Image (tube, grey):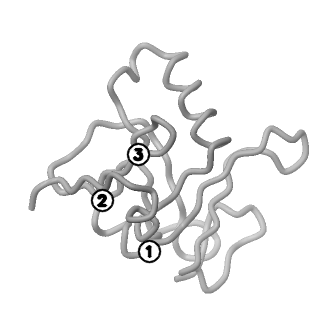
Amino acid sequence: MSAETISSPAAAESVVVLTEPAARQIASMLESDAANAGKSLRVFVEGGGCSGMQYGMVFDERRADDLVVEFHGVGVVVDPFSANYIAGSVIDYSDALTGGGFKIKNPKAASTCGCGKSFEA
C-alpha cells in the first residue's frame, strides 16, 4: 500500500486534526532539535495504560503505509492500525501550569483514564 496524502483539513478529519496551538508547539519542538529535521509527528496507539490502549506521539520518518496529513505547516503521520482507533481525534495543546500539555479528544474512546493518556476502545 502506498502513502496516502490528505491535503485539506476537512478531508483529514477522518484521521486526526491538530489545533493551531498544538501545531505551534510541535513546530517549536521540531525547530529546537536538529535531529528532528525533516520528520513528522507520528501519532499512534498501543496496548497498555490503565484503560487498555494508550496514545503515543514521537517525531518519525514517514513509512509507505502511513496516512499523512498536514496542519498549520506540521506534518502528521498515522499508521493504519492506529488510524482505526483514533480516526476523528483532535489533538490540542495548552501551556497552563495545571492540566497543560497535549490533549487528545477521541470520539472513538468508550472511556478514558484520569490522566488522559489511555483509553478503552
Q: State how far apart marks 2 and 1 are (Cα).
A: 10 Å
| Image vertical order of residue 23 relative to residue 65, above or below | above
Q: Quadrant of residue 106?
A: bottom right
Q: Quadrant of residue 51?
A: bottom right
For marks 3 and 1, give the one nearer the viewer. 3
Q: Secondary structure at mark 1?
A: helix
For marks 2 and 3, give the one nearer the viewer. 3
Q: Label 3 amino acid?
A: Glu
Q: Which residue is nearer to you in this view: 19 or 50?
A: 19
Q: Which mark is residue 70?
A: 3
Tell me where residue 54 appears, x and y as whole percent: 54, 64
Q: Label 2 amino acid?
A: Asp
Q: Secondary structure at mark 3?
A: strand
Instruction: Give the residue pinned by disc 2.
Output: 79
Q: Secondary structure at mark 2?
A: loop
Label 2 close to label 1 by CB (< 8 Å): no
Q: State how far apart marks 3 and 1 are (Cα).
A: 19 Å
Instruction: Give the residue pinned by disc 1.
Output: 85
Q: Residues within 10 Å of mark 2 (few under 14, many from 20)?
A: some
Tell me where residue 111 appears, x and y as whole percent: 66, 82
Q: State how far apart marks 2 and 3 are (Cα).
A: 15 Å
